[in-house]
Image: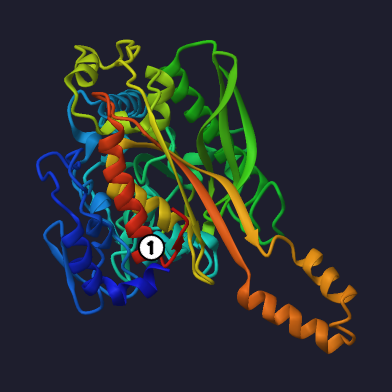
Amino acid sequence: MICSTLRRVGHMHIYLVRKASGVSKGHHQHTVGSRPAASEFAARGASGNVLELLGKSYPQDNYSNLSRKVLSRVGRNLHNQQHHPLWLIKERVKEHFYQQYVGRFGTPLFSVYDDLSPVVTTWQNFDSLLIPADHPSRKKGDNYYVNGTHMLRAHTSAHQWDLLHAGLDAFLVVGDVYRRDQIDSQHYPVFHQLEGVRLFSKHELFTGIKDGESLQLFEQSSRSAYKQETHTMEATKLVEFDLKQTLTRLVTHLFGDGLDIRWVDCYFPFTHPSFEMEINFHGEWLEVLGCGVMEQQLVNSAGAQDQIGWAFGLGLERLAMILYDIPDIRLFWSEDERFLKQFRVSDINQKVKFQPLSKYPAVINDISFWLPSENYIENDFYDLVRTIGGDLVEKVELIDKFEHPKTYLLTLQMEWRSGKMNTLEDKLNYHIDFLKTHKTSHCYRITYRHMERTLSQREVRRVHQAVQEAAVQLLGVEGRF
């Protein structure tokens, strides 16, 4: 849908700027009470335009789908801002790996990369990780594309191949990642991941193992649920054991002793076997990270054919929300001193329990519209709402779907009884006409809530009206408001 709207962006910019009455430029957030510039959603370059991002120029094309809201977050690097809760988590993980894993010369075994550019190629983000060309994770509706060849990384795994190719065999990568998603207290289009990778040579893996000199890393066999076709069972089990032991030590360091942990089998394109770790925290099982034995095809392509390894990835926001009892993911972007000062601690391992700010009342408005006949992507609507409403939007939920005509079968039955359809051809023609004319309506409930003060209905009405206008003009919907 966004691809087709790009051709109209130039005309839409003029239209929406005329409708807008002002936007704050000082805080990456709209001035509530003035009409937001809905044209901010159209911060997508039509073919031929150029986007300047982090000191580089990128030509725009029909794949470009970056909103100004997302662009305003690029380069903020919350994980590198001292005493920010995400920085605290990163530093605790880094300190743990530095202290627990030391190389031959007394230096840290793991190197840390926390300032790599979030702009990567689609090859880095997908192909290098063996993600198939038709895999649903590549969809425009789920990612932020700079153009057809570059994007904002969807995971820190996008840097795995390059670092392995550079000869590294133990490293952590920390950074901001970008995904188009639903809007609620647990999801935000920008979040932060920490990735860990470790490779082993035959000597490193089998040293200290009885009869280890006779064991091998590789063989040619068949793939099973427990191993890859090129790995021996002995090597797979040792790598899996080391991985789970490493991660158990890490979460014990973060959450304390006595933590109940369980492992759930899962699937990732770039590891096999793959697992998710769940912890029992305050009586509830919570998924905290994903991991697995690295696909040997990936390792081989990066030039490390004689090694075998593991990889894991975790979300910093996820851990911080659990550890510090932070209820809303938008708070990580807050510059409210009442939030930030709670994490200014002298010791990064000091326990912190977030003291909630006063929760101001919500203002709830609904929006209903008929969907266009084709190419409607729900994440386009979420992106539009977040771009115009900014962090005033706490939640968007689809509360109703309606189809007109109400049901195909009921209408077909009535036509049949009336004697208008006597042949198979009549039925087929009716079905074709139905597909051409039937409509689907969506009704969304948008919850607006400012994290620092009370909103008025008048203020929200202006934002909500801008959302309505932009949905009609940019998404091609037919309003029911």
| Picture layout, residue 60 above or below residue 113 | below
x 42%, y 32%: residue: 185
Q: Taking the image as drawn, is residue 109 in sight? A: yes
Graded by Cα atoms within 10 Å as few (under 14), some (14 to 19) or many (20 or more), the crowding at tag 1 reads some
What x and y, as percent, mark residue 7? 30, 77
**Colour option used:** rainbow
Residue type, label 1: Val
- The N terminus: image quadrant: bottom left
Task: Say which of 480 and 310 sits in front.
Answer: 480
Task: Say which of 373 and 177 sits in front.
Answer: 373
x 36%, y 54%: residue: 468
Residue 95 left/right relative to 318: left
**Which residue sits furthest front?**
418
| Picture layout, residue 349 above or below residue 65 | above
Quadrant of residue 79 within the rendered picture:
top left
Residue 330 left/right relative to 204: left
What x and y, as percent, mark residue 92? 31, 23
**According to the image, label 1 marks what residue?**
472
What x and y, as percent, mark residue 366? 45, 43
Task: Say which of 58 and 100 sits in front.
Answer: 58
- Total labels: the figure holds 1
Q: Taking the image as drawn, is residue 310 in sight? A: no
Tell me the SS state at disc 1.
helix
Quadrant of residue 414 within the rendered picture:
bottom right
x 34%, y 24%: residue: 96
What x and y, as percent, mark residue 237? 63, 39
x 70%, y 81%: residue: 432
